[in-house]
C-alpha cells in the first residue's frame, strides 16, 4: 500500500472537505428559516396558519391539495408556510410585494361592477410552477427575497379607499398561499363596504375554500386546461381539485368567472376545449362567464408564438355551441368579443372597448331591451 | 491541416445549431466554446497514454479511424441535438443553463475527444517519421486549416450551403484523407468501399431530411422557411393563419400583432410635428404603417441590419410601397454615426441587451450618437422587457442603469409600461398621457387609444417604476467599453431559468479546476504555464478586439472573418518559425516574447481609448491597425507555443498532448472568463490589466525557476 506524507494527507483532506461542501451546497434547498434559526420569533409579517393538522411526520398544511408536511425548519412548496418550533406559520402576512390599481375588467371580471377599479395586491409565493407564469418574479420567489410593503390587513382597506377603488383583488401570484392575510383583509374590507375578489388557480381544499367564501364576493378562476396530464406538465398541479373548487364557489354563491389561457401546442386542442365546455354546462356553469385569453410568450414558454386569433374565435364558438351563455376573448384588441350580449335577444347590453365600458344597457340586472336576467353583480 | 479545417468547420456549424436550438447569449456561446476546448484538451491529454500499436501501420490505422470519426460525428451531433430536444422537452420551452451544459458535454464529448487525440497522434506521428520535434509545425498546419475553414465559412460558405451540405463537404474531405492515408499503407479495398458508401448514404439522407430534422424544433407549427444568415438563423413558421419569424429561437415578429402600435405611437405622440422618423427593426410593414398615420411625417427611414429578415417578412406582409418609406440595410449605429440634426424621432426596437452586440444599442456612446442625429426637440425611444407587477433585483439594476445612462445625455427621461417598458428621452419634456395625446392628434388605432390605455394608470405605473429605480441612479452607466448591462441581463436569464445551485457549483468547479491546473502547472511545469497564460491572453485579446471592432465599426459580419484570419494567420506564423538554440538563449527568448505579449495586451485598451475612442484617424487606418494588433498578438501566442514545445523536457508525444491540451484549456478559460466576467464586470481596461498580471506571474515564475539541466 502506497504511503503518503503528512502534507499530502492534509492537502487531499482539505480538497475532499471542499468537495463535500460543494456537493452539499449543490443539492441544498433554500432554507427560508435559516435567518430565523437563532431568533426567538419569526418576523412580524407572520401569523399562525388556520388549517393544519399534526401528523407523526410533521405538521400538515391543509390549505391546498399539495398538503405539505413540514418538520421544524421546513418550508412549504409555495414558500409561504414554515414550521417554526413545531408550529405552522404563514410568513406572507401584511407584506405584499405588488400593489397596483387596475380596472376590474383586467382581472378579468366582466360581470362584476363593470367600470370600477380594484386595488390589486399580492405577496410572493405560489402553489403552482406554471411554465408560462407572467408573474414568475414573485410567484416563484419567497417573501423573504422580495421587496415588500408593510401593509397589515387594516391598511389594505384604507389604501383601497384612498385610491377610489370599489374592490380589493387578491391576485398576481396565488392568493391561496397568503390565505390568512387575504381572509383578514377581506373581513375588514367588508366592514368598510368594499368588495373582495380573488384571482386564483383554484387549487384549494374544500374546508378553507368554504371558509373563505364567507368573505369574498367574486372569484376569477383560471381553468388552465381540462387534462390532468397537462396540469402536471404545464403547471405542476392537478385538475380535479380545481373542478371541485369551481363547484364550491357555485354552491356558496360567490360570483364566479372562469378564464382559460389558450396556449398553442398545450391547451388549444378543440377536443379538450369542447370537453371542458361540456363539463361546465353539465355542472351548472352555463351562466358563468368564460374568458378565452390569448397567450403571449412568457417565462419559460417564450419560444412559442402567441395564440392565433382564429383559434380563440374557434374556442369561443365551441363554448357557445356547448351552451355557455357568456363567452369572451381577452388580450385581442379590436374585436367585439369583449361585449356582453343578452343570451335571449342577442343585443349588446354592455359594450366594451378594451377595459373601458362604453355602453351599459343593464337595468336592475336585466336586459334593457327584452328584460332577460343577465347574470352578474351589476350594482 | 485537414484536422484544423474539420475542427473549425464542425465547430462553427455545431455552435450555430446549438444557438438555433438554445437561443444565444454571450454566456451560452462562451460555455459552448469552453466545453469544446476542455473536451479537446482532455482528448489530447489522454492520447499521451494511448500509444500506437507499436508499428507504423498501427499508427496510420489509428489516425485513419480518428479522421473518419471526425467526419461522421458532426452528423450525429446535429441529428441528436434536434431529436433529443424534441423527446426530452415540451414544445416551446426555454432551456436552462444546466440543460445546456449537459447537452454540450454529452453531444460534444465524442467529437472533441477524438479531435484532441488526433492532434497528439498526428504531431507525434509526424515527429516520429521525420525524426524531429514537429509539434509546433503541426500546430501551425492545423492553424492554416483553421484559417481556411474560418474565412471560408464567414465569407459565404455558411450561407451558400445548408448545415448538412457543409457537413457533407466535411465528410468528403475526411473520407478522401482516409483513402489517401490508406493508399499509402495499402489498406483493404473492400473496407475503403464500405466506408465511402456509408458516408455517401449518411450525407445524402441527412441533406434530404434536413427540413424534417429542423421541424422537430418547431413542433405544432409548420416550418415555412429557414435560412442561416450572418446574424443567426431565421425561421418562419405558420400556425392557425399566423406567421411567426424567429431568430435563433427568439420570437422577433409575428402577424396579428396589435401591440406593434405601442413603440411607434408612444414615441411619435411626444413630438408636436414629427417629420423625419427613423425606426430600427420591429417589422417594416407594421412600423411604417403606424408612422405614416401622422400627416406631418415626410420620411420614415427603416434601418435593418439583416436583409434576410426583410425577405422573410415579405413572405406574408403586403407592404404597399410608399415613397416616404426608405429601407436602409445597414448597422444602425453605422447609419447614424455621422448624421446631424436629421431626425425628429428615433425608435429603436432592439431586443434586450443579452449580448455584447445588442448591448451597443443601450450605451452612452450610442445615445450621444442618437442625440447628434436628432434635432433639438427630437425624441429617442428604446425599450426593455416589461417588468410587469414587480421588478426583481436584476430588472431593477438593468432598468436603473439604462435610465441613468439616458439621463447622462438627455434632459428628460420617462417610462411607459406597456407590453415592454418604453423609455422616452428628449431635451424637451416627455409625458405618459398617451390617451389624451392620441385623442388630440386625431389618430385612430386598434389598441393605442383611450379605451385601452388609461392615462392615470399609465402615470401611476410610470411613477412606480421610476420611484423604485431612483435609489439606483448613482449606479455605473453602460458604455461601449464597459458593457455592464449585458452582464445584468445574463444574471437575469440565469435566475429565470431557475438554475439550481448545482449549475453554479459546476461553473465554479470548472473555474476551480482551472485554478488547480494553474497551481499544478506552476509547481511542475513552468513552461506549460507560459502556454496556458499566453493562450488565455491570446483568446481574451481576440474576443476583446472582435468586440472593439463591432463597437467601433458596426456589425459587419464579413470583416469578422478577416479578423479571425488575421488571428489564425499570426498564430500559424508564430508556431512555424524555426525556434532553436541552447537552453539559455531559448529561455531568454521565451521570456522576451511573453514580455512583449504583456505589452501588446496592455496596448489593446490603449488602442481602444486612445485611437478608436478619439476617432481622429481615417477608418481604414484604424481597421488596419486593429488587424495588425490582432495578428501580432496571435504571432506572439504561436511563438510561445513553438518555443514551449522545444523547452518542454518530455518526449514528443507527451509534449504534443500536454501542450495542446493546456493551450486549449487556456483558450477556453480566456474565452469564457473574458466574455462573461472580465469585460462586462471590469470593463476593457481593467480586464486587460488582469490578463497582463496573469502573464506577468507566469513570466516571473518561469524566469526564477527554470531548470536548465532538464532541458535536452
Image (cartoon, coloured by chain):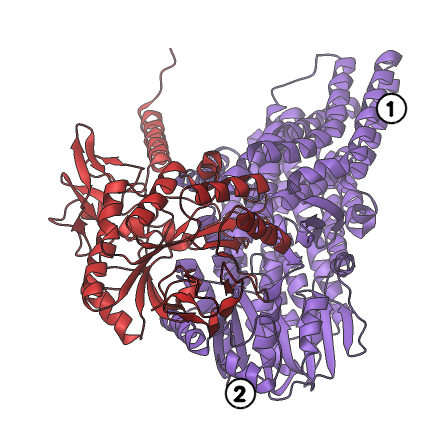
Chain colours: A red, B purple
Q: Quadrant of the rendered structure where residue B59 is?
A: top right
Q: Secondary structure at mark 1?
A: helix
Residue depicted at x 72% and y 69%? B303
- In the depicted structure, whether residue A33 falls above or below residue B425: above
- Which image quadrant is residue B206 in? top right
Residue at image position (83%, 14%) is B191
B587 w.r.t. B194: above or below? below
Q: Nearer the viewer, residue B35 or A130?
A: A130
The answer to whether residue B581 is seen in the rendering is: no
The earlier-in-sequence mark between 1 and 2 is 1
Q: Residue at x 61, y 61 (%)?
A: B358
Classify the position of the N terminus of chain A by image quarter.
top left
Q: Height in image: B311 above or below A132? A: below
Classed neighbour count for the residue bearing mark 2: other residues with Cα under 10 Å, few (<14), some (14–19), many (≥20) = some
On-image quarter of the C terminus of chain A: bottom left
Image disc number at residue B43: none
- From this viewpoint, which residue is outermost toward the front? A370
Q: Position of residue A192 (x, y in %)?
A: 20, 69
Query: Residue A97 versus residue A274: which sits nearer the camera?
Result: A274
Asked which quadrant contains residue A366, the reply is bottom left
Residue occupied by mark 2: B428
- The reply, left or right, for residue A332 in relation to residue A6 is right
Nearest the eye: B633 or A122: A122
Is residue B486 shown above or below B657? below
Q: CA distance from mark 1 to mark 2?
A: 73 Å
- Check whether the beta carbons of the residues at disc 1 and disc 2 lie within 8 A of each other: no
Residue B180 circle label: 1
Percent from the top left, x then y, of residue B503?
A: 45, 40
Amino acid at each position: 500500500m502506497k504511503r503518503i506524507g503528512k502534507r499530502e494527507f492534509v492537502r487531499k483532506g482539505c480538497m475532499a472537505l471542499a468537495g463535500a461542501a460543494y456537493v452539499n451546497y449543490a443539492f441544498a434547498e433554500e432554507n427560508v428559516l435559516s435567518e430565523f434559526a437563532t431568533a426567538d420569533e419569526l418576523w412580524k409579517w407572520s401569523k399562525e396558519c388556520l388549517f393544519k393538522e399534526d401528523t407523526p411526520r410533521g405538521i400538515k398544511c391543509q390549505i391546498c391539495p399539495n398538503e405539505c408536511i413540514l418538520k421544524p425548519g421546513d418550508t412549504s412548496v409555495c414558500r409561504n408556510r414554515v414550521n417554526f418550533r413545531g408550529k405552522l406559520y404563514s410568513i406572507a402576512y401584511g407584506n405584499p410585494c405588488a400593489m397596483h390599481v387596475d380596472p376590474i375588467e383586467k382581472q378579468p371580471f366582466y360581470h362584476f361592477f363593470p367600470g370600477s377599479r380594484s386595488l390589486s395586491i399580492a405577496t410572493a409565493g405560489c402553489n403552482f410552477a406554471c411554465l408560462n407564469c407572467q408573474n414568475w418574479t414573485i410567484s416563484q420567489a419567497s417573501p423573504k427575497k422580495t421587496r415588500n410593503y408593510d401593509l397589515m390587513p387594516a391598511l389594505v382597506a384604507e389604501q383601497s379607499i384612498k385610491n377610489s377603488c370599489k374592490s380589493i383583488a387578491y391576485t398576481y401570484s396565488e392568493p391561496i398561499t397568503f390565505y390568512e392575510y387575504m381572509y383578514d383583509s377581506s373581513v375588514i374590507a367588508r366592514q368598510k363596504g368594499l368588495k373582495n375578489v380573488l384571482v386564483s388557480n383554484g387549487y384549494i381544499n374544500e374546508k378553507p375554500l368554504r371558509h373563505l367564501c364567507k368573505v369574498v364576493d367574486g372569484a376569477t378562476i383560471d381553468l388552465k386546461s381540462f387534462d390532468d396530464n397537462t396540469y402536471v406538465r404545464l403547471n405542476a398541479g392537478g385538475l380535479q381539485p380545481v373542478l371541485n373548487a369551481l363547484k364550491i364557489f357555485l354552491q356558496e354563491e360567490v360570483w364566479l368567472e372562469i378564464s382559460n389561457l389558450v396556449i398553442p401546442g398545450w391547451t388549444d386542442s378543440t377536443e379538450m376545449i369542447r370537453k371542458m365546455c361540456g363539463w361546465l354546462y353539465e355542472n351548472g356553469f352555463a351562466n358563468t362567464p368564460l374568458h378565452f385569453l390569448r397567450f403571449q410568450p412568457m417565462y419559460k414558454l417564450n419560444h412559442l408564438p402567441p395564440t392565433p386569433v382564429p383559434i380563440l374565435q374557434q374556442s369561443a364558438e365551441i363554448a357557445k355551441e356547448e351552451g355557455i351563455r357568456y363567452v369572451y376573448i381577452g388580450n385581442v384588441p379590436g374585436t367585439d368579443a369583449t361585449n356582453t350580449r343578452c343570451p335571449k335577444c342577442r343585443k349588446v347590453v354592455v359594450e366594451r372597448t378594451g377595459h373601458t365600458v362604453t355602453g351599459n344597457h343593464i337595468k336592475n340586472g336585466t336586459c334593457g331591451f327584452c328584460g332577460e336576467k343577465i347574470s352578474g353583480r351589476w350594482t | 491541416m485537414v484536422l484544423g479545417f474539420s475542427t473549425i468547420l464542425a465547430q462553427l456549424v455545431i455552435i450555430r445549431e446549438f444557438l438555433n436550438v438554445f437561443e444565444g447569449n454571450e454566456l451560452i456561446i462562451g460555455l459552448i466554446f469552453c466545453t469544446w476546448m476542455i473536451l479537446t484538451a482532455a482528448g489530447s491529454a489522454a492520447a499521451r497514454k494511448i500509444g500506437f500499436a507499436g508499428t507504423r501501420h498501427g499508427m496510420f490505422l489509428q489516425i485513419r479511424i480518428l479522421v473518419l470519426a471526425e467526419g461522421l460525428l458532426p452528423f450525429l451531433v446535429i441529428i441528436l441535438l434536434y431529436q433529443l430536444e424534441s423527446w426530452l422537452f415540451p414544445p416551446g420551452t426555454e432551456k436552462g443553463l444546466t440543460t445546456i451544459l449537459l447537452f454540450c458535454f454529452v453531444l460534444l464529448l465524442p467529437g472533441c475527444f477524438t479531435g484532441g487525440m488526433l492532434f497528439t497522434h498526428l504531431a507525434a506521428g509526424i515527429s516520429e517519421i521525420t525524426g524531429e520535434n514537429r509539434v509546433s509545425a503541426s500546430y501551425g498546419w492545423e492553424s492554416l486549416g483553421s484559417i481556411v475553414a474560418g474565412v471560408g465559412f464567414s465569407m459565404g460558405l455558411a450561407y451558400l450551403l445548408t448545415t448538412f451540405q457543409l457537413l457533407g463537404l466535411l465528410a468528403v474531405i475526411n473520407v478522401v484523407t482516409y483513402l489517401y492515408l490508406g493508399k499509402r499503407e495499402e489498406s483493404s479495398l473492400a473496407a475503403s468501399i464500405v466506408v465511402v458508401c456509408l458516408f455517401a448514404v449518411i450525407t445524402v439522407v441527412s441533406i434530404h431530411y434536413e427540413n424534417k430534422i429542423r421541424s422537430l424544433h418547431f413542433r405544432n407549427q409548420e416550418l415555412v422557411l429557414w435560412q442561416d444568415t450572418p446574424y443567426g438563423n431565421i425561421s418562419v413558421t405558420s400556425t392557425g393563419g399566423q406567421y411567426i419569424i424567429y431568430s435563433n429561437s427568439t420570437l422577433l415578429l409575428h402577424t396579428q400583432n396589435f401591440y406593434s402600435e405601442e413603440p411607434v405611437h408612444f414615441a411619435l405622440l411626444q413630438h408636436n410635428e414629427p417629420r423625419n422618423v427613423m425606426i430600427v427593426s420591429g417589422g417594416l410593414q407594421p412600423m411604417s404603417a403606424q408612422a405614416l398615420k401622422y400627416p406631418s411625417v415626410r420620411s420614415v427611414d427603416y434601418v435593418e441590419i439583416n436583409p434576410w429578415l426583410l425577405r422573410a417578412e415579405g413572405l406574408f406582409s403586403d407592404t404597399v410601397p410608399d415613397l416616404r418609406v426608405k429601407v436602409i440595410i445597414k448597422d444602425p449605429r453605422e447609419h447614424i454615426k455621422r448624421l446631424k440634426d436629421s431626425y425628429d424621432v428615433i425608435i429603436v426596437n432592439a431586443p434586450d441587451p443579452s449580448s455584447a452586440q445588442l448591448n451597443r444599442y443601450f450605451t452612452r456612446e450610442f445615445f450621444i450618437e442618437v442625440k447628434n442625429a436628432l434635432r433639438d426637440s427630437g425624441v429617442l425611444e428604446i425599450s426593455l422587457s416589461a417588468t410587469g407587477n414587480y421588478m426583481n433585483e436584476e430588472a431593477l439594476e438593468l432598468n436603473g442603469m439604462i435610465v441613468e445612462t439616458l439621463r447622462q445625455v438627455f434632459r428628460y427621461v420617462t417610462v411607459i409600461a406597456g407590453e415592454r417598458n418604453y423609455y422616452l428621452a428628449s431635451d424637451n419634456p416627455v409625458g405618459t398621457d398617451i390617451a389624451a395625446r392620441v385623442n388630440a392628434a386625431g389618430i385612430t388605432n386598434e389598441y393605442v387609444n383611450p379605451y385601452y390605455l388609461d392615462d392615470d394608470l399609465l402615470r401611476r405605473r410610470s411613477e412606480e417604476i421610476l420611484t423604485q429605480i431612483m435609489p439606483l441612479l448613482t449606479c455605473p452607466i453602460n458604455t461601449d467599453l464597459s458593457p455592464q448591462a449585458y452582464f445584468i441581463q445574463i444574471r437575469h436569464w440565469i435566475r429565470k431559468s431557475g438554475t439550481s445551485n448545482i449549475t453554479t457549483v459546476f461553473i465554479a468547479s470548472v473555474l476551480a479546476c482551472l485554478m488547480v491546473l494553474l497551481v499544478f502547472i506552476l509547481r511542475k511545469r513552468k513552461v506549460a504555464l507560459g502556454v496556458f497564460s499566453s493562450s488565455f491572453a491570446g483568446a481574451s485579446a481576440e474576443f476583446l478586439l472582435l468586440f472593439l471592432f463591432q463597437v467601433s465599426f458596426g456589425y459587419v459580419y464579413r470583416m469578422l472573418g478577416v479578423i479571425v484570419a488575421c488571428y489564425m494567420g499570426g498564430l500559424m506564423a508564430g508556431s512555424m518559425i524555426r525556434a532553436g538554440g541552447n537552453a539559455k538563449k531559448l529561455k531568454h527568448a521565451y521570456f522576451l516574447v511573453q514580455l512583449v505579449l504583456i505589452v501588446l495586451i496592455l496596448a489593446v485598451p490603449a488602442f481602444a481609448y486612445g485611437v478608436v475612442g478619439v476617432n481622429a484617424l481615417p477608418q481604414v487606418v484604424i481597421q488596419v491597425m486593429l488587424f495588425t494588433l490582432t495578428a501580432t498578438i496571435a504571432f506572439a501566442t504561436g511563438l510561445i507555443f513553438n518555443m514551449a514545445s522545444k523547452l518542454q523536457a518530455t518526449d514528443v508525444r507527451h509534449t504534443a498532448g500536454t501542450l495542446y491540451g493546456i493551450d486549449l484549456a487556456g483558450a477556453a478559460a480566456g474565452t469564457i472568463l473574458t466574455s462573461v466576467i472580465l469585460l462586462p464586470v471590469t470593463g476593457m481596461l481593467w480586464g486587460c490589466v488582469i490578463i497582463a498580471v496573469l502573464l506577468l506571474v507566469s513570466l516571473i515564475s518561469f524566469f526564477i525557476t527554470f531548470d536548465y539541466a532538464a532541458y535536452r
